[in-house]
Amino acid sequence: MQTAVYPGTFDPITNGHIDLVERAARRFERVIVAIHSSTLKETAFHWEERVELAKTVLAGQKNVHVEGFEGLLVEFARSRQAGVILRGLRAVSDFEYEFQLASMNRQLEPDIETLFMTPDEHYAYVSSSLVREVAALGGDVTPFVHKKVVAALNRRFK
């Protein structure tokens, strides 16, 4: 058993993310949900808010830790003695980008493996960007995110 890092922007964390974390937590001694501080994407929530939301919804997982990070993912993973980077694949369309990331990370740090996981089929179509869009347009996102995230989205998109 070893440490795995599950990186992302988590803007917001969805039930699909939670599903992957819970399943990974059964297979690894420690899972670090690593939320990057800067992103090329425009986010609905500031970095600190994304970290706090993830900590709130994952609080019941004893071997799961949520941390924000800056810089290169492989450097963060190395600093936490993680041997695995977890990435989620919802659809074939995710694969090309994820394959490029995994290949670059392997070039930067050959000792850290990237493992891909697919979400439960109930969450295969759920993405943070779709959740944000539905919430911004006044739609009900309760089937897709934790109730604390629903509340945060409602506050954000009043």
Image (cartoon, rainbow, N blue to C red):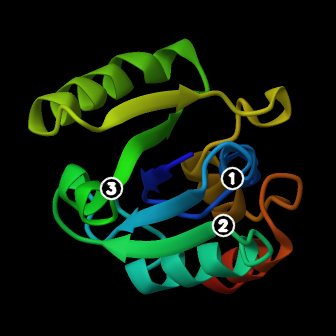
Q: Earlier in the sequence, mark 1 or mark 2?
A: 1
The residue identified by callout 2 is: 63
> Residue 25 shows which numbered tag?
1
Looking at the rendered image, the disc whose residue lies closer to the viewer, 3 or 1, is 1
Local SS, label 1 = helix
Mark 1 neighbour density, 10 Å: few (under 14) some (14–19) many (20 or more) = some
* Total numbered labels placed on residues in the image: 3
Q: Earlier in the sequence, mark 2 or mark 3?
A: 3
Determine the residue positioned at 22% across, 50% down.
74
Determine the residue positioned at 87% across, 61% down.
142
Q: Quarter holding the C terminus?
A: bottom right
Specify the amino acid type for callout 1. Answer: Ala
Q: Position of residue 90 (x, y in %)?
A: 61, 27
Q: Is residue 53 left or right of residue 41?
A: right
Residue farthest left in this picture: 108
Specify the amino acid type for callout 3. Answer: Lys
Q: Mark 3 to mark 1: distance in Å? A: 28 Å
Comparing 105 with 127, the one in front is 105
Local SS, label 2 = loop
The residue identified by callout 3 is: 41
Specify the amino acid type for callout 2. Answer: Asn
Q: Mark 1 to mark 2: distance in Å? A: 7 Å
Q: Position of residue 31 (x, y in %)?
A: 56, 58
Can residue 40 be seen in the rendering of this structure? no
Q: Position of residue 82 (x, y in %)?
A: 37, 53
Is 106 situated above or below 143?
Answer: above
Mark 3 neighbour density, 10 Å: few (under 14) some (14–19) many (20 or more) = few
